[in-house]
Amino acid sequence: MDSMHDLVIRNALLIDGLGSPPRRGDLAVKDGKIRETGTASLPGKQTIDADGLALMPGIIDNHTHYDAQITWDPGISPSPQLGVTTAVIGNCGFTIAPCRPADRERVMRNLTQVEGMSLEVLKSGIRWDFESLPQYLALLERRGSAANIAVFAGHSAIRTYVMGEAATQRVATDDEVAAMRRIVVDGVRAGAVGFSTSTSPAHNGEGGEPMPSRLADDREMRSLVGGLKEAGRGVFMLTKGGHTPMAFLDELAADSSRPVVVAALLHNSTNPESVFKDLEAIRESNARGRRLVGAVSCCPLAMDFTLRSPYTFEGLQSWQPALPLKDAAYREKLKQRAFRDAVTSELAQPAHFRLFNGEWDKVHVVESRRKEAEHRSVAELARAAGKDPLDAMLDLALEEDLDTVFSALLLNSDEEAVGRMLRHPASLVSLSDAGAHLSFFNDAGFGLHLLGHWVRRRGLLTLEEAVRRLTSHPAGVFGIRGRGALLPGYHADLLLFDPDKVDRGPKRRVFDLPGGHPRLSTPAIGVEGVWVNGTRLSGEALPGRLLRDFLP
Ligand SMILES: [Zn+2]
């Protein structure tokens, strides 16, 4: 007979994650699980007086890329400090398992561009104590992590495992497709949360090689998603390029009977209706009995970049000739009139999805040797110099040995539109991309931004609805059991915060990657405590578990 709880949090504003109105009360934890909510009938070995602060289930971040980082940093900094108690890794198919020793370099080269980490960082960081996907899962389970982790079986790693070098060069043979499908089925049966892929032209490896999944034809996609049907479980996650029609995803959802997460629905001011068309198509599919969600972001997508690694432009067709070039040859290309004209004319064409759309007034100089240029937009500098904006940016960068730092507000900058997307019934709050694009942006604090910006400042959602969108909603989509709600019997993943202050702080450069390399981070504001499986996060605590047992 229990005589005491391990922990009682008294006098909190309980927000249950299910959308119920907040209510004052206690929450009691024993053996890592929530035992009571409302009024605690037993005392706690430890008692915390919340004094009216809000207590919610921990945030479930369904779109992260900690696959490499977690092998050297099981703390997956900074997500847990930002209230995230469960992270889904391996989105977009960018995984590092399975991987043969001979393919490690190839897999790391694929990741450098999309992850925004140098090959050097990945080489000194990744601990390759695995070869197969089940071995990778076992490694994470053995070592523990600060947050709970769910892992996708990722298309690009699987394709490289089966096809080697040819993975980035051609369509697969029937035998190769069958071998890939076997890995998906076995991976999901071993505990992967689903199968992830990307057909986005923004996703390139080193030297502009397409990510392997981009070479897959429809037959390969059908077969691999069919693997989820065969396994009887798992979510299909895809970051889609403009050439992947919603009708095809509807067909995959219907044939596999599995949930489909469609990313990345970011609002583009030059093609403002396209994301709403996708969300409507998803709503219509669901009305026909499918289970799809559109992954949207609650954050404006701003990227810092230099012309050394301009992710902002690398998805452009006209930029491709520059991608494999280095040093002098690359600089020469950036100077070429024909190259610049091709970029300018491509930007003048409308596109379904494109990171950068020629909005030069939203590209600013952040760091330059010409101090007078800092904080001014490229559009302004171009007007002052009587130049075309692309010329103004490239000339400035070339003059400064490509060290000039620019910041581009790319997508999701129209607040009215983002508000409509967040309220759309087919949308899933997602796309933090935590663990990737480390030198470009960091939205790991997306949940705190939803609570601070969209609830408190903008009043777009009620607090309880925003909390639901960060907790039980993603738990339901991904089949995560026993998490995402403050219910007796549920795991004690908790976030205690001040609703009058909660926010994410300004981004800053920190130098904590292997070898002291920099990345961007944001501090938490108004977060008073985070618990994972009943353990309060502090220092080196690794109470997170590998999640393997998802709802069918
Ligand atoms: Zn991603």
Image: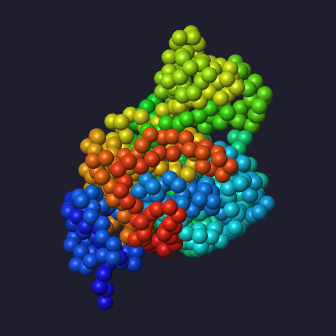
Residue shown at 54%/43% (left/top)?
Answer: 520
Using the image, determine if residue 266 lies above or below residue 249.
above
Viewer-side residue, 422 vs 545? 545
Viewer-side residue, 442 vs 260? 442
Q: Is residue 170 among what the camera can see?
A: no
The residue furthest bottom is 1
List x then y, in percent, for residue 516: 65, 47
List x then y, in percent, for residue 503: 37, 46
Residue shown at 37%/75% (left/top)?
Answer: 33
Q: Quadrant of the N terminus?
A: bottom left
Using the image, determine if residue 77 lies above or below residue 1.
above
Residue shown at 28%/51% (left/top)?
Answer: 499
- Give residue 164's quadrant in the image: bottom right
Viewer-side residue, 248 vs 461? 461
Query: How is the structure coloured here?
Result: rainbow
Q: Quadrant of the C terminus?
A: bottom left
List x then y, in percent, for residue 32: 40, 75
List x then y, in percent, for residue 529: 38, 60
